Image: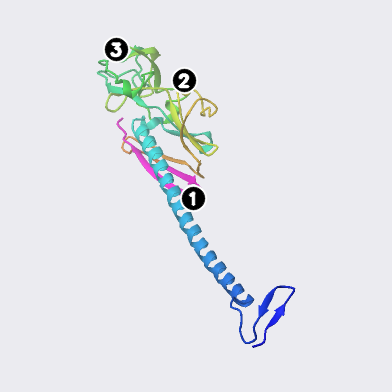
Amino acid sequence: MKHYLLKAKGILLTPGIRSSGFTLIELITVIVLLSILSTIGTGFVVKTTEAYQRTQNRALIVNTSRQALERMTRQLRIALPYSVRVTNGGNCLEFMPIAAGGNYFDPVPDNENLAAPRNSIPASPVPVPADFGTPIFVTIGAMSAAEIYGTTAVSREGYAGGNITLSAAKRWQRNSFNRRYYLLDNPQAFCVVSNVLRFYQGIDVASANVDVTGASDIIARNVSATVPFTLAAGTENRNTAIIISLDFSSGGETINFTQRVLIRNVP
């Protein structure tokens, strides 16, 4: 058997015996296959992660919207129906919450009963629960928001306390069909401002719009809407209907929620 000595490398080769190992083509094939498997596996992990994130975002949107709409619904249902109005170019829903109410005994002076204006209402005083707000105004027979807001509202007067004492002598626009009066707190409002749903209270009753630069509570962020509030005003035999349509967003996901609120009209 012949042996060949490669002195430079110190390797002894024996004719007829091949050294074992991978060829370059085999290595390249393995690398390509591993790359394909790696790409498929990474894509699966990424898609699974994205799906989980979308689910989390949608759950967050649903929870946020549910809390916001439930709060709005609860507060609107104790509003005087005729006090609800849309202001600030459609971005605010303003209303006056009812603090208390009751029935008066005899007709009050109005445009048909031209008796002298009086600074009191012949009615028994009504205890006002603290949770219902502070009575600041009295209203009788209101039929529209224009009769309640403003500096000289024909269906609103200041409340001075006691046995339904008014802050000034008053001749009302009309008597209530059921001889009912309401004690109201200062106006409140829900507004969409810079993609934030805010709640304002203590609003000036004489102002035509809500001062959105004033103090407010944040109800929800990342909120937008083309027409956030739609109002179908009530009548003597029809409830006031409010449609709230808001888009809530989170992590690139956006869901529209529409809520219909009915305010029972008791004239």
Type of amino acid at the residue the image marks with label 2: Thr
Marks 2/3: CA distance? 23 Å
Type of amino acid at the residue the image marks with label 3: Asn
Which of the pair 233/77 is nearer the observer? 77
Q: In the rendered structure, which disc, 2 or 3, sits on the residue that comes first in sequence? A: 2
- Say which residue label 2 marks: 152
Q: Residue furthest front?
A: 1
Q: Is residue 24 left or right of residue 141?
A: right
Residue 237 sits in which quadrant?
A: top left
- Say which residue label 3 marks: 163
Q: Position of residue 221 (x, y in %)?
A: 49, 38
- Say which residue label 1 marks: 253
Q: Can I make out residue 100 in this image?
A: yes
Q: Position of residue 178 (x, y in %)?
A: 27, 27
Residue 208 is marked as none
Mark 3 crowdedness (10 Å alpha carbons): few <14, some 14-19, many ≥20: few
Q: Position of residue 25 (x, y in %)?
A: 62, 77
Q: Can I make out residue 234 in this image?
A: no
Type of amino acid at the residue the image marks with label 1: Glu
Q: In the rendered structure, which disc, 1 or 3, sits on the residue that comes first in sequence? A: 3
Q: Is residue 245 magenta?
A: yes
Marks 1/3: CA distance? 55 Å
